[in-house]
Amino acid sequence: MVASPLAPPARFAWRLDDDGVSSRLEFGDGLAEIDGVLVRGTAWLDPTGWAPEDHAYMQAEMLAATLAWLAGLQCPVVNRPSAALWYRDRASLLTWRRALRRCGLTTPEQVVTNDPAAARAFGRRLEGAGLAGAVYSPLTSDANYLVATPAAWQSLTDLQERAPVCVSEPHGATLPACVVGGRVVWDDGATPETLALEARLIRLASSTGLDFLEVVTAPLRSGPGVVMVEPMPVLEHFTPAARSRILDALADLLVPVGAGTEAIR
């Protein structure tokens, strides 16, 4: 496991010419023979010894170089990222909404507004449907806050004086799913209605070019839907049994059975 494979003491060369892309990576003990890569996060450069402005510049260069390296590798790369995902870590559900809808997946009803009256009217409509209130979600993170009391609505109004806010319908208990290698691994508790989402979840992973994707589902007013998408899945979100199945599927992606080597179990 390497936090930043191109950082010193590694020596790296990347070449783009008429024949395509080639790269060479050496660690302290010589040329790195790479059989497969699992992308678990973005590149990171230790800020120790750097002035803040220089570190920001070098961090951007490190991200760009690592993205180019991953794009050009000929070996299996699980979650070879697009630029949109590479530079937009932990995007909010609002960012994923269009892709989810294209795949036939339901998302919570949401309103983005800086008008307190519009937000409050949305909340009253949800309360009229029997829900506890509305959920405030910052546009720059995946945090959520229930807005259900007069004091909470006043706090939301104060925020709206500075910027628009996103409010959405509350949802029921969450259930994570992991799409890996064209199959869906569920935690315990998946209902027939939730299992019926599998083909659409696989379509979502395929449309984003990711073969390892975490999706959190939950009951909504209109049925089961998606409330979070995580392009860098967190195995700790799953039970040990589900985690074992996910690791088996990852091993099959990195070391395909029939390629001269048995998949690691």
Image (cartoon, rainbow, N blue to C red):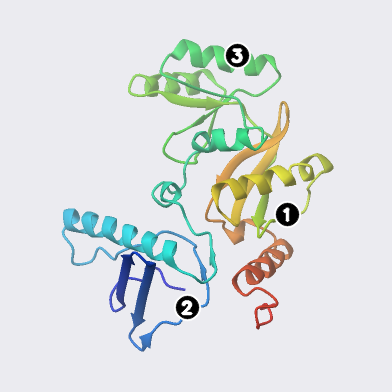
Q: Secondary structure at mark 3?
A: helix
2 and 1 marks in contact (CB < 8 Å): no
Q: Is residue 8 above or below residue 249?
A: below
Callout 2 amino acid: Ile
The residue at which mark 2 appears reads as 34
Q: Position of residue 53 (x, y in %)?
A: 17, 53
Q: For mark 2, does the 10 Å Cα neighbourhood hold few (<14), some (14 to 19), or many (20 or more) residues?
A: few
Q: Is residue 38 visible?
A: yes
* Alpha carbons under labels 3 and 2: distance apart: 57 Å
Q: Secondary structure at mark 2?
A: loop
Q: CA distance from mark 2 to mark 1?
A: 32 Å
Please identify the quarter of the rendering in which residue 162 is found.
top left
Residue 80, position as x, y percentages in the image: 49, 59
Residue at which label 1 appears: 187
Q: Nearer the viewer, residue 202 or 72?
A: 72
- 203 on left or right of 95: right
The residue indicated by pointer 3 is: 124
Q: Residue at x 57, y 37 (%)?
A: 99
Q: For numbered disc 1, what is the local secondary structure?
A: loop
